[in-house]
Amino acid sequence: MDQGNTAFLLICAALVLLMTPGLAFFYGGLVKAKSVISMMMLSFGAIGLIGVLWVVYGYAIAFSGSEGVNLPFNIDTTNIGLAAVYEEASAPTGGYPLIAFAAFQATFAIITVALISGAIADRAKFGAWMLFAGLWATLVYFPVASWVFNFSLADDGSFSDGGWITYGLQETFGLGVIDFAGGTAVHINAGAAALALALVLGKRVGFAKGAHVPHNPPFVLLGAGLLWFGWFGFNAGSELAADGVAAVAFMNTIAAPAAALLAWLVIEKIRDGKPTSVGAASGAVAGLVAITPACASLTPGWAILLGVIAGALCALAVDLKFKLGFDDSLDVVGIHLVGGLIGTLYLGFFANGTGLFTGGDGTQLLVQAIAAFAVMIYSFVVAFIIGFAIEKTIGFRVTEEDEIAGIDPIVHGEAGYVLEAK
């Protein structure tokens, strides 16, 4: 066992887990003061529920070791409760125990589900959200993770076969999809589900541009900083080894979001006359989203260009909800769906050696598009069905009266800010 790589993987897993509390601060600062507890609890609820489901059966679905389109019933029964990887931990086949990899991938599942919650801020019931999160993870995230991340492990520790997005398309087109850390499985997946839920729940009371302003921009900046910090584990850790590829991914995780931050601020200055702290935070996250699939397959120069494109386009995309009439409260669609699509498709043009403009032909762009839109359509359809069913049965949305008053005391019996003396 390579103790260095094992330690690296475990540290990266801890970094990625920190991203979900970071997301809670990021989202919590964006909502109104009387909804901050509710908003943050959606992220912490995801940590609890998805963490348990991953151990019980999520890993067994996502990493069943079988080839092809992995449906929810395609499960490795030997890993129910992580039984097989637990037994393997003392004598690992490869350079690190698979239970370390299972822990790392658990944090991906958690953050992906938590991302969706930003689309339903200020108006969702906690119990309904938890039901949705469990069903969506089971029917969408775990299978899609298999499409993208799944592999078969040979006796010599090498990887082969696996999900249809990474391995199946390679057999068909001669080039596999490049998705180093989850542009499809995480960001496009979550962004499409967020759009579906925004349509199911409908608009907030008084929905209009400028009607809902962030109550705590310092929380937003703190959350963005924690997300960026954790993202180094997300991207560099996906190499599963402390080597040169991880170092490239690490460097690009600095370059792209830094450029995206600047691009977002420029767009704000031109459009609104003032660059904002929330814009800086949002731009950095947009760049992080875009570089996620691409971090190991671009030179730092191309990573900066990707950041500029993602920062500018996502800054423009967040206004689409006002033009198209869907209330994606905290811009999950504008940042994660759009940013994920940009990063995934950008590789079709600029991926090292295979991009259209970097020595390849149109094949890389074709397979990137197939993967991106397959995940987007599947996630949107299933999320819409689940959300619609919940809304029509137990109800997903709080009453308008509770929404106007602020849902923290109604749903959780707490207030985010208690200023009066006791």
Image (tube, helix red, strand yellow):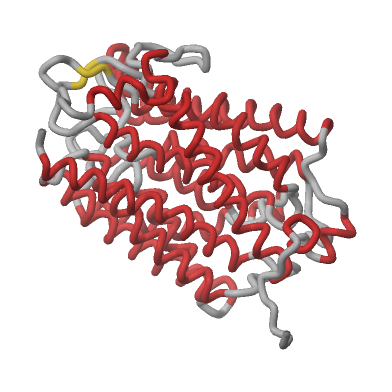
Query: Among all residues in the image, which is located at the extreme right?
Result: 401
Residue 150, percent from left and from top: 34, 23
Q: How many marks?
A: 0
Residue 366: name its quadrant. Answer: top left
Which residue occupies the foreground of this view, 93 or 65?
A: 93
Closer to the camera, 351 or 116? 116
Residue 206 sits in quarter = bottom right
Residue 71 relative to residue 108: left or right: right
Residue drawn 52% across the image and 17% down it: 72
Q: Is residue 301 visible?
A: no
Using the rendered view, name the quadrant where residue 413 is placed.
Answer: bottom right
Quadrant where the C terminus lies?
bottom right
Q: Point out the residue furthest to the bottom here.
A: 421
- In the image, residue 289 above or below residue 241: below
Q: Is 196 on the left-hand or right-hand side of 106?
A: right
Q: Position of residue 251 (x, y in %)?
A: 21, 56
Q: Residue at x 66, y 35 (%)?
A: 132
**How far across and how far down the image is residue 403, in percent?**
82, 59
Residue under the point 60% across and 33% down: 134
- Image vertical order of residue 11 relative to residue 173, above or below: below
Q: Quadrant of the N terminus?
A: top left
In-image side of 88 versus 69 (left or right): left
Q: Is residue 182 left or right of residue 199?
A: left
The answer to whether residue 270 of the structure is visible from this angle is: yes
Compared to residue 61, the image places residue 216 above or below, namely: below
Measuring from the top left, give residue 205's x and y in whole percent.
83, 59
Nearest to the observer: residue 369 or residue 414: 414
